[in-house]
């Protein structure tokens, strides 16, 4: 059997069909999906042209801004191709990022930013300790361990950890936001639900997180989202879920843009930007 020629013939036929299928079936939702690309460009413009503060450029929270924007752009790329199931996984990740952003901006921004930034030293220490245990249990050769950590780097990591460890759980330093919640949670590390509740996102967590997780964990309930007249389909699929996911991702991106802009733009420019964002957001959602 000549698999190559058969697959080439099938591909030529199927790709033409897929292109037409995506264009025709997705037309109804194009306005909502395209809005993600438009606001991603705004986020990109602000990040590259307007947020000039050294605190933004040098801080690890810049990566939260970048991740939220790139998550939204990833949602756009998925939805424009009818990949609703894959979109759910990305939006769940975007939601988790937005919870972290909201936690930072809900209190003392400068202090919370340092908690987030300095946790990198704890993570390096945890990684070093984990590999040391592998060596002790003969699961990693000392020679291999030395490739990761020289004597000098071990001292630097240990010293950095000692400088900042008081702000993280004394026995289980597994979360950057422990210090924020330590009194409220009696010294325990926060989980995502605790953080969502702490920054006013409990309803989002309760309504959406479990639903989005169905895709991540490959639940049998996925069949409902992948159903067609002929049963479960492997083809891209557009539905009202396409519109809902686009607007949900857009909502988190807009809130991220506003949070960062309020902090790093001057008040007049922020007010002008807010009016621009709100006008364009209304244009998108008025037909929802």
Image (cartoon, grey):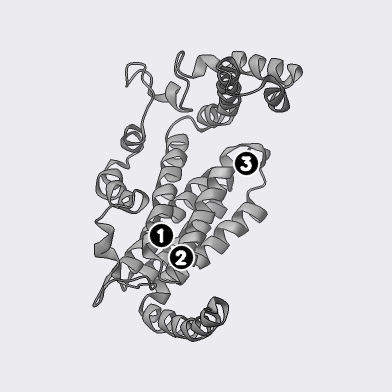
Q: Which mark is residue 258?
A: none
Earlier-in-chain disc, 2 versus 3 = 3
Q: CA distance from mark 2 to mark 3?
A: 29 Å
Q: Is 133 drawn above or below residue 84 in the view shown?
A: above
Instruction: Indicate left or right for 142 with 273 as reference.
Output: right
Label 1: which secondary element: helix
Crowd around label 1: few <14 · some 14–19 · many ≥20 (10 Å) = many
Q: Are marks 1 and 2 in contact (CB under 8 Å)?
A: yes
Q: Is 77 drawn above or below residue 199 in the view shown?
A: below
Most foreground residue, 253 or 54: 253
**Residue 185 rendering spot, x and y as whole percentages:** 32, 21
Most foreground residue, 188 or 288: 188
The residue that appears at 41% across and 59% down in the rendered structure is 86
Circle 1 is placed at which residue position? 87
**Residue 31 rendering spot, x and y as whole percentages:** 41, 75
Circle 2 is placed at which residue position? 78
């Amino acid at each position: 059997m000549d698999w190559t020629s058969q697959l080439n013939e099938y591909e030529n036929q199927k790709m033409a069909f897929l292109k037409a299928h995506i264009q025709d079936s997705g037309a109804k939702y194009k306005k909502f999906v395209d809005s993600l690309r438009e606001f991603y460009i705004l986020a990109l413009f602000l990040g590259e042209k307007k947020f000039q503060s050294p605190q933004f450029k040098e801080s690890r929270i810049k990566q939260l801004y970048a991740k939220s924007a790139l998550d939204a752009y990833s949602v756009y790329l998925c939805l424009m191709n009818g990949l609703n199931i894959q979109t759910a996984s990305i939006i769940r990740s975007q939601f988790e990022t937005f919870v972290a952003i909201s936690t930072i901006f809900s209190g003392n921004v400068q202090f919370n930013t340092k908690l987030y930034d300095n946790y990198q030293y704890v993570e390096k220490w945890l990684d070093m300790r984990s590999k040391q245990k592998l060596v002790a249990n003969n699961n990693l050769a000392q020679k291999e361990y030395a490739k990761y950590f020289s004597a000098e780097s071990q001292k630097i990591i240990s010293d950095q950890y000692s400088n900042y460890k008081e702000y993280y759980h004394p026995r289980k330093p597994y979360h950057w936001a422990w210090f924020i919640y330590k009194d409220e949670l009696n010294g325990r590390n926060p989980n995502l639900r605790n953080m969502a509740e702490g920054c006013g996102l409990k309803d989002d967590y309760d309504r959406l997180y479990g639903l989005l997780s169905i895709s991540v964990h490959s639940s049998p309930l996925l069949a409902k989202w992948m159903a067609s007249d002929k049963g479960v389909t492997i083809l891209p699929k557009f539905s009202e879920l396409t519109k809902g996911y686009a607007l949900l991702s857009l909502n988190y991106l807009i809130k991220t843009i506003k949070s960062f802009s309020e902090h790093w733009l001057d008040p007049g420019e922020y007010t002008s930007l807010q009016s621009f964002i709100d006008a364009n957001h209304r244009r998108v959602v008025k037909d929802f």
